[in-house]
Image (cartoon, rainbow, N blue to C red):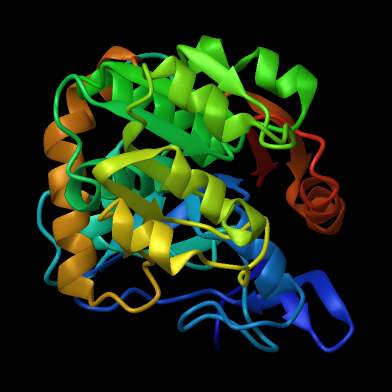
Amino acid sequence: MTETMKAAVVTAEGVRVQQAPRPVPGPEQVLVRVRAAGLNRADLGVAAGHAHGRMGGAGTILGLEFAGEVAAVGAGVTGIKPGDRVMCAGSGGYAEYAIADMGRVQPVPDRNMSWEEAATLPVALSTMHDALISNGRLAKGEAVLILGASSGVGLMGMQIAKHMGAGLVIGTSTNDERRARLKEFGADHAVNTNDADWADQVLALTEGRGVQLVIDQVSGGTINAAMRATTILGRIVNVGRLGGAHGDFDFDLHATRRIAYIGVTHRTRSVAEIREEERVARRDLRKGVDDGVFHLPIDRVFALDEAVEALAHMKANAHLGKIILKT
């Protein structure tokens, strides 16, 4: 008889919290008794019935990150055992049990970190290390601009940039209250991209040169101004498209400034690529995680039964930091 669990499932009628089969770990997978799960923007698209890489469609259990105790491990898993307190990136986190590849499982720090805090970290840490370091090639002393900096991933990006030696960190937000708080998370300056002259503001902050690296979570109508704010031979790493997936693109400006424009996603990466991404992020950031250097504010905690309400809260875009489901 198949064991079941409570989970937030995509159905033809929308997201429903209902019974679903409990997953069974494969040879190199870990089964976790989920205690808390973090919400991410990608969850909204999956909840609406869209595909996100291999995820999507009726029957999909939502969620991309979670924390809890290891319940079982596959035969090929080493260094992880039942009972370990872990935080993971993996699909199906809006549930009482979820599976993660062994390469995406890391221990919860031995300090007094709650399940809710642990569930805020996996996606933001790996995504922003990958954007800033592996793809953005951040060098010590460089100036960094993070578009959409008040999101959970954006707040983490500013902290990682500072930790890895950025000389100047500029964050953007169109919300006055959230923009005022960006300095708490590593921003030296905060800019409003609703201002017609926001690129000129960035240029002024960099003595006319522009930033060496832009982490773009917005795209849409901001891309040309972002290129104006980027120095010659600078890099733009496109992580998200909160402002739209399409927009006017000034190819001459791009060529004149000789900008390297880099797109990143996890949707087309192999297991081996993702494991390597996690490995290098852990190499650079794990001590900071253990020491409490990196943190994200928790905007609100919902029960698993309130998954629909939690998604609506995220869609309203009135939060700062992470929204958490507690199971």
Name the foreground residue: 9 vs 233: 233
Name the foreground residue: 185 vs 271: 185
Q: Taking 128 as reference, is 19 above or below it?
A: below
Residue at coordinates 66% horizontally, 40% vertically from top-left?
Answer: 324
Residue 327's spot in the image, x, y percent?
66, 47
Residue at coordinates 22% horizontally, 30% vertically from top-left?
Answer: 285
Question: How many marks overall?
Answer: 0
Q: Relative to 134, is 147 on the left or the right?
A: right
Residue 172 occupies quadrant: top right
Residue 210's spot in the image, x, y percent?
36, 31
The answer to whether residue 323 shows anywhere in this view is yes
Q: Relative to 59, is 265 on the left or the right?
A: left
Q: Taking 18 as reference, is 282 above or below it?
A: above
Q: Relative to 62, is 230 on the left or the right?
A: left
The answer to whether residue 95 shows anywhere in this view is no
Residue 267's spot in the image, x, y percent?
40, 75
Residue 104's spot in the image, x, y percent?
28, 55
Name the foreground residue: 210 vs 176: 210
Q: Taking 120 as reference, is 62 above or below it?
A: below
Residue at coordinates 32% horizontally, 27% vertically from top-left?
Answer: 209
**Quarter holding the N terminus?**
bottom right
Q: Taking 224 as reference, is 210 above or below it?
A: above
Name the foreground residue: 254 vs 281: 254
Residue at coordinates 31% horizontally, 62% vertically from top-left?
Answer: 255
